Image (cartoon, rainbow, N blue to C red):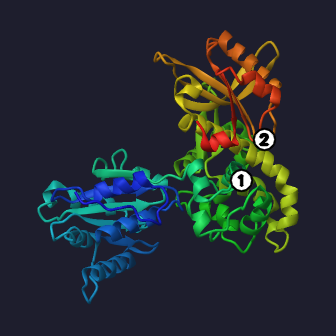
């Protein structure tokens, strides 16, 4: 089997590249289907262009147009790839697909990419059925070993492409989702000089590769001292692409028709309303009215719906794209001022408390949960984690409740399901004995309910560090773990 080294300009994406190479070189004379999806700006087109160039394949990027114009563009592109002086003139997609499936006429597997496939399917709704027919065993005697890849950023559409009774259900030999870079990869990608700067930057731009290359032209914060200046010049600057990106992301989703409603829902979540009832109260609507918009936002990957770690009847909605949360919590309320050139520095000084409370604090908690789930060693938790979430613990005696930022459920060393650890995360607080005592008290409450054991570990997460007496108390106690920003980015 042929091997194709990953391009030197491609950061990370080792798994995605290896799967594309595997698919591109699948042996056999039959045409096959693969589907590549993922949120916008993640580098899907870059990946597919690279595998197409490496293997000598054909790539067509669709535009939002009519069926007749799409066929004209496709015929011209296919003819140019074939080296023909005149374009193909296809009357319908049946003809176009028949010609496409002959592209690997040398007998060697040939990659064929149709990027922005949802645009074509919108203009020609029968196209998935026509592709299914072209891939049927009855048609394979006229096909060549084309390795067809359909790509799109409309997550809800791409998800339906292979689900339920969809025509292409069960046809794909590759279903590749290109994710955002995780917080550690993002730190490397942005050349963050230290963990503190890495987390501050990630709280705004997340792990979307395009935001460094295309949107900021490589402008990165040089350190904590430069972060505020970077926000002013690169994010809140009305002449820079990042300034309006939070708005455009919503407008680019084909399933979001009532954008005003969806913006309002996102603004409510960004303001700290994570339950459906709280979101509904903020919008002046009934909670039942929000079932559809919340489901749609979840389907397009803009929000997540996370169950409470301790209460089955409770859950939390969170915005999954940091830039959208930043736009709604910080930028949108001051949009009129920010649009006026030269106002960003003054407005940012006024907005920093909002950034710390509405964005940075919750984002730090989320990073801590991701670290606990994917980066911490099993010894850190005293077992293998299977789920990590936040949760609420009732305290009947005190008539109050306590929030747990990081609750790790999993299996202990004997394979028994248990609560491995509970943790509190504070970005701006230097944590001390009082924080540890609070976790001791919550663990006692959970033990009384049968939801924890004395072996459940206590974890403290801080962006600013820990007091000397807390270090002394925990130095010889492995059941208590102190996790600072450096450990989040470099340790386990």
Q: Residue furthest bottom?
A: 85
Q: Position of residue 411 (x, y in %)?
A: 50, 21
Q: How crowded is mark 1: few (under 14 residues within 10 Å), some or many (20 or more)?
A: many
Quadrant the C terminus occupies = top right
Taking the image as drawn, is residue 170 in sight? yes
Q: In the visual, does 262 lie left or right of 111?
A: right
Tell which circle, 1 or 2, labels the residue nearer the N-terminal end. Answer: 1
**Where is residue 475, by image quadrant?**
top right
Which of 368/466 is in front?
466
Q: In the visual, does 218 lie left or right of 414?
A: right
Q: Residues within 10 Å of mark 2 (few under 14, many from 20)?
A: some
Q: Which residue is drawn at 72% across and 67% down?
A: 234
Which residue matches tag 2?
464
Q: Where is residue 125 in the image (x, y as percent from the top left)?
A: 37, 62
**Where is residue 231, by image quadrant?**
bottom right
In the displayed structure, would residue 471 be above or below residue 237?
above
Which of 1/323 is in front?
1
Q: Where is residue 285 in the image (x, y as percent from the top left)?
A: 71, 44
In the displayed structure, would residue 214 be above or below residue 34?
below
State the SS at label 1. Answer: helix
Separation (CA) of disc 1 from disc 2: 12 Å
Q: Position of residue 254 (x, y in %)?
A: 52, 61
Q: Which residue lies furthest to the left in this view?
A: 141
Q: Residue at x 85, y 69 (%)?
A: 343
In the displayed structure, would residue 246 be above or below residue 285?
below
Q: What is the total number of numbered labels drawn onto the structure image?
A: 2
State the SS at label 2. Answer: loop
Which residue matches tag 1?
197
Which of 244/299 is in front?
244
Quadrant the N terminus occupies = bottom left
**Where is residue 89, by image quadrant?**
bottom left
Q: Residue at x 47, y 15 (%)?
A: 414
């Amino acid at each position: 089997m042929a091997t194709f080294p990953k391009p030197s300009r491609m950061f990370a994406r080792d798994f995605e590249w290896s799967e594309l190479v595997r698919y591109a070189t699948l042996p056999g004379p039959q045409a096959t289907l693969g589907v590549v999806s993922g949120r916008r700006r993640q580098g899907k087109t870059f990946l597919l262009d690279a595998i197409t160039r490496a293997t000598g394949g054909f790539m067509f990027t669709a535009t939002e147009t009519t069926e007749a114009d799409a066929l004209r563009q496709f015929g011209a592109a296919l003819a140019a790839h074939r080296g023909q002086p005149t374009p193909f003139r296809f009357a319908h997609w049946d003809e176009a697909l028949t010609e496409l499936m002959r592209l690997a006429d040398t007998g060697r597997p040939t990659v064929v990419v149709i990027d922005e496939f949802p645009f074509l399917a919108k203009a020609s709704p029968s196209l998935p059925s026509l592709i299914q027919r072209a891939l049927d065993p009855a048609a394979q005697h006229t096909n060549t070993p084309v390795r067809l890849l359909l790509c799109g950023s409309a997550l809800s559409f791409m998800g339906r492409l292979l689900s339920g009774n969809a025509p292409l259900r069960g046809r794909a030999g590759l279903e590749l989702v290109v994710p955002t870079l995780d917080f550690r990869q993002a730190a490397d990608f942005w050349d963050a000089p230290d963990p503190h700067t890495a987390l501050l930057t990630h709280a705004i731009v997340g792990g979307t590769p395009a935001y460094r290359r295309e949107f900021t032209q490589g402008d990165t914060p040089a350190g904590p001292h430069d972060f505020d200046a970077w926000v002013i010049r690169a994010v809140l600057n009305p002449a820079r692409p990042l300034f309006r990106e939070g708005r455009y992301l919503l407008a680019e989703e084909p399933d979001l028709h009532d954008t005003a409603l969806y913006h309002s829902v996102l603004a409510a979540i960004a303001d700290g309303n994570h339950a459906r009832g709280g979101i509904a109260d903020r919008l002046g609507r009934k909670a039942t009215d929000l079932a559809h918009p919340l489901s749609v936002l979840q389907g397009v990957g803009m929000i997540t719906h996370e169950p409470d770690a301790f209460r089955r009847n409770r859950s939390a909605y969170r915005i999954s794209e940091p830039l959208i949360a930043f736009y709604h919590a910080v930028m949108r309320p001051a949009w009129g001022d920010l649009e006026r050139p030269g106002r960003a520095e003054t407005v940012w000084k006024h907005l920093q408390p909002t950034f710390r409370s509405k964005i940075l604090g919750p984002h730090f908690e989320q990073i801590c949960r991701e670290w606990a789930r994917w980066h911490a060693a099993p010894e850190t938790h005293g077992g293998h984690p299977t789920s990590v979430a936040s949760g609420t613990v009732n305290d009947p005696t005190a008539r109050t409740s306590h929030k747990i930022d990081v609750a790790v459920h999993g299996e202990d060393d004997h394979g028994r399901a248990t609560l491995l650890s509970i943790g509190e995360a504070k970005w701006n607080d230097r944590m001390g004995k009082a924080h540890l005592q609070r976790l001791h008290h919550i663990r006692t409450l959970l033990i009384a309910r049968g939801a924890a054991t004395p072996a459940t570990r206590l974890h403290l997460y801080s962006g600013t560090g820990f007091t000397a007496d807390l270090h002394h108390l925990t130095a010889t106690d492995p059941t208590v773990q102190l996790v600072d920003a450096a450990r989040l980015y470099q340790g386990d």
